[in-house]
Amino acid sequence: MPKSFSDQLARICPDPIIGVDRAGYITLFNRAAEKLLGYDAKEVIGTLNIADIYHPPEAGREVKRLMYNSEINGYGQIQGHESALKDRNDRIVPIQISATLVMENDKEIGSIGFFHDLTLRKALEKSLKQLSITDGLTGLFNQRHFQSTLVKEIARSNRYNHPLTLVCIDMDNFKLVNDQLGHMAGDNLISFMGSLIREELRTSDYGFRYGGDEFMLLLPESGQQQSLTVAQRLLSGLVQKSPLSCMDNAPEVGISIGIAELQPKEGPEQFFRRADLAMYQAKHLGGNQAQIASDVPTTSEPATRSVSAC
């Protein structure tokens, strides 16, 4: 194929094409590559090594290794490999690359790669993943995400010997709201609780809608007393801002809260059980209050102390 013809194909190709010599210096940089990475072909050809725009740097070495691994795609080829490049402004661009060695007189003189921008696909994947772990009514994480996050944060707490607290929340008299005011009022109340919880969370905290009217908070780097402060603000916030407060004959609604701080060698089930039992203790004592589980892990009802709504 005449070189002029191949150059024309490279210019009109909608996907970025980058060619390099054996040392990795760029020899071909089409218009789509210019648009993707922000460089002008004239400034990179012969002067910029492709290793300098892979992110991280070892990603380029991985591409080269795969190129020479005949067991994967055949010697001198790579197909559909996902990696990332840095553009002129150091923005990370996810890409998919298919490449082949360029031979002349049976000697390798370089390689040519076809790059596909994965930015939109990655954004969509991230959005879909977020939807899969988010409760639609409250904007909090869902129960599915709670299980994996609990295990992960327990491991992190143990690794760094940092505190971790689990807060279990259950609404009082929620069934009466649905029965007397209808499910729309119940949904509004659940949505309000989600907003109230999100207002109290730090960026490092997690809030979950665990069930119908059950919520979980996972608070890394927080001990019992810090979590107790969060609980008190939730109790006060529900009293002061409840969407039912302006409705005639609305049932009195509160929240029962159980708090447990992770103990040494405590697993997810035992940790969860202590917070859950503390919550039921709060409900047993009349509701609309918080109970702190004892420091000693137990399989029976834990000793607790409480703080009630103002």
Image: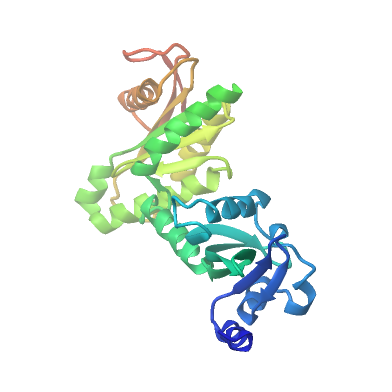
Residue 163 in sight from this viewpoint: no
Q: Which residue is at 44% across, 52% downward?
A: 72
**Residue 80 placement (x, y as % from top left):** 46, 62
Question: Foreground residue, 73 or 223?
Answer: 73
Q: Which residue is at 65% across, 51% downward?
A: 56
* 81 up-or-down from 252: above or below: below
> Which image quarter: residue 203?
top right
Residue 298 in sight from this viewpoint: yes
Q: Which residue is at 63% across, 84% downward?
A: 3
- Residue placed farthest to the left in the image? 179
* 154 up-or-down from 183: above or below: above
Question: Foreground residue, 101 or 267?
Answer: 101
Question: Foreground residue, 131 or 68?
Answer: 68
**Residue 302 placement (x, y as % from top left):** 38, 14
**Residue 29 placement (x, y as % from top left):** 67, 75
Quadrant for the N terminus, please. Answer: bottom right
In the image: residue 188, left or right of residue 294: left
> Which image quarter: residue 88?
bottom right
